Amino acid sequence: MPNEVVQTALASATADVSLWTLFMQAHIVVKIVMIGLLSASVWSWAIIIDKSLLYTRTKRQMDRFEKVFWSGQSLEDLYQTLSGRPNHAMAALFVAAMREWKRSFEGHARSVAGLPGRLEKVLDVTLSREVDRLEKRLLFLATVGSAAPFVGLFGTVWGIMSSFQGIAASKNTSLAVVAPGIAEALFATAIGLVAAIPAVIAYNKLASIASQHAMRLEGFADEFSAILSRLMDERG
Amino acid sequence: MKNVGLVASSVGHVAVLAWALISLPSPGAHDVSDLEILPIELVSVSDVTDVVKGQSTAKVQKKVQEATRKAPQPEEKKPEPAPKVAPKPKQAEPQKQAEPEQPKAKPEPAPKVEPAPKPEPSPKPEPAAKPEPAPKPEPTPKVEPEKKVEPQPEPTPKAEEKPQSEPTPEEPKEAAPKPVAALPKIKPKAPPKPQKPAEEKRKFDVDSLKALANQADSAQPTQSGEQDQDASFGSRNGREAAAMTQSELDALRAQIAQCWSPPVGAADASQLAVKIEFGLDQQGNVNWGPQPIEYPANQFGVAAVESAMRAVRRCAPYTLPADKYDAWRRVRINFDPSDMF
């Protein structure tokens, strides 16, 4: 009888302990945790890549737009070229404000009196919409960053719990019996950390970039509304 | 556009997982070399260092026992100096005188042995006497049980051996090749018969000679039971002469313990455990301290420390091995009543 125990213990010790077998041997709860964490990792990396591309693109476009905007080109011409496809946040602000401006001067009834107020409103709405678009889904990264370790820990605790139940059931305390269970349980925490660490780092980085862009947009909106109100006063 | 991130992320994860599955498939079993299992027995040092209670006049027995056990070596040496046989007969006379005395002194081994020797001495004066001289001069009182048995059996085998002489040497050859060399010499020269060949002969003869077997059996118990018969070497109270075999620290502790009167009233010896440190000069006088290091944490603490320090001062000239002065120049000692009394 002891010989059998030893042999089974050795057999399980020398068994395949690759990641795949670790995963397949795991308890169903641990499996779900692992899969969830894996998909969270996939999704958070998708967001990271997406946002990184978006921010670099946005920055480049804003640089180009500001260069054009401050080059002394006529606002009308600029509006004509951009009105069709305001493809970035600053252009969207510009187009929204210009549209409101032009509508106010169209037709016979010139409604100039409330124009500054309306411009503010339009710029605010557009600004908040654009900032929302920039920061969209960043919160998911924050959630993954803070929750994934706990989820992984849950999987670990569950796995260790079930492996201790295995000890209780088999009445064999050999490390070889316990080790695979603990290894697969710890694997859950490992996946949790793998998902969480990049998410936290990327969230901090992307959030700061997003707030920089938002401030830049805000500054542009203020400046542009100041320009428009000066023009309005000049036209009298 | 939006899908770029998702696709890239998925592809990246799949790639990483595939790499992980392929490149770290199994972390290689640990090489566990078979460890030899060593049975470990815990032996308290005090078994060795505590001196056995005995008489200080007695001589050390162990050496004698060792000497008798190492007999095969002396055997070979003795045959060579055979010419020295001449002095031995002179010694043999006192031995003969001693033999009758010894049986009187030691009744236990005697009964079995006595019958044999009394008739023998007359027919075999020289062979019986000669083996004895060498060992006997050294350990007079203690060795007697062992050696009496040995010489006595020897005579008997020889008396019988002379008829049997040929078969006996052949038998020992199988088991003890070395004695064989000695035996042939013994027959002509007779004198240098050491104890061991005799014992071996007895053992070999056990098959043929029942009487010898009895004697051989009687010899063994006497060896093992020596301590019961004779006071072995030691101090009267088991402590005094401690330095002879105890470690220096134990010896010092024993000396101090004699002067120590622990404070009265402590319920429990462990309450009085004190650690103090003091310095000694070459003559064993206290030249520094004593100074307490640990006080017991109870109401007897101060009293216990005081009594320990008093004891150290009172016993002052300590006898310790001078050549190890460096070891006891500065002494740190635990006063623990449960150890010391």
Image (tube, coloured by chain):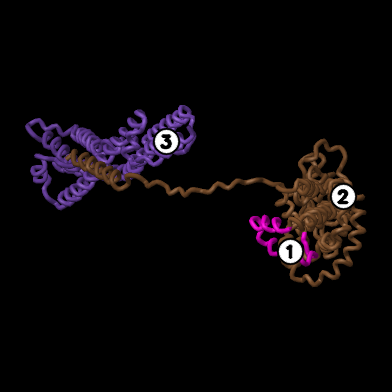
Chain colours: A purple, B brown
Point out the stretch of residues depicted in magenta.
Answer: B165-194
Q: Nearer the viewer, mark 2 or mark 3?
A: 2
Tell me: B333 left or right of A31.
right
Q: Position of residue B49 (x, y in %)?
A: 77, 52
Q: Pointer 3 indicates a residue of which chain?
A: A
The percent coordinates of residue B151 (x first, y second) are 82, 56
Relative horizontal placement of residue A93, taking residue B60 as reference (left or right): left
| On-image quarter of the C terminus of chain A | top left
Q: Give the vertical position of A155 relative to B233 (above or below).
A: above
The label number, if any, that marks residue B1 in the structure image = none
What residue is at 41 percent from the left and 32 percent from the top?
A159
The first of marks 1 and 2 along the sequence is: 1
Query: For the residue marked with disc 1, what is the amino acid?
Result: Glu
Q: Amino acid at mark 3?
A: Thr
x and y percent of residue A43 in the render?
Answer: 26, 37
| Residue at which label 2 appears | B114
Please determine whether, in this image, residue B285 is positioned above or below residue A98.
below
Q: Are marks 2 and 3 in contact (CB under 8 Å)?
A: no
Q: Secondary structure at mark 2?
A: loop
- Circle 3 residue: A8
A220 or B258, which is in the foreground?
B258
Check if mark 1's residue and mark 2's residue have beta carbons within 8 Å.
no
In magenta segment, residue A181: no
Q: What's the amino acid at mark 2?
A: Glu
Residue at image location 40% in from the left, 46% down from the top: B29
Foreground pick, A215 / B85: B85
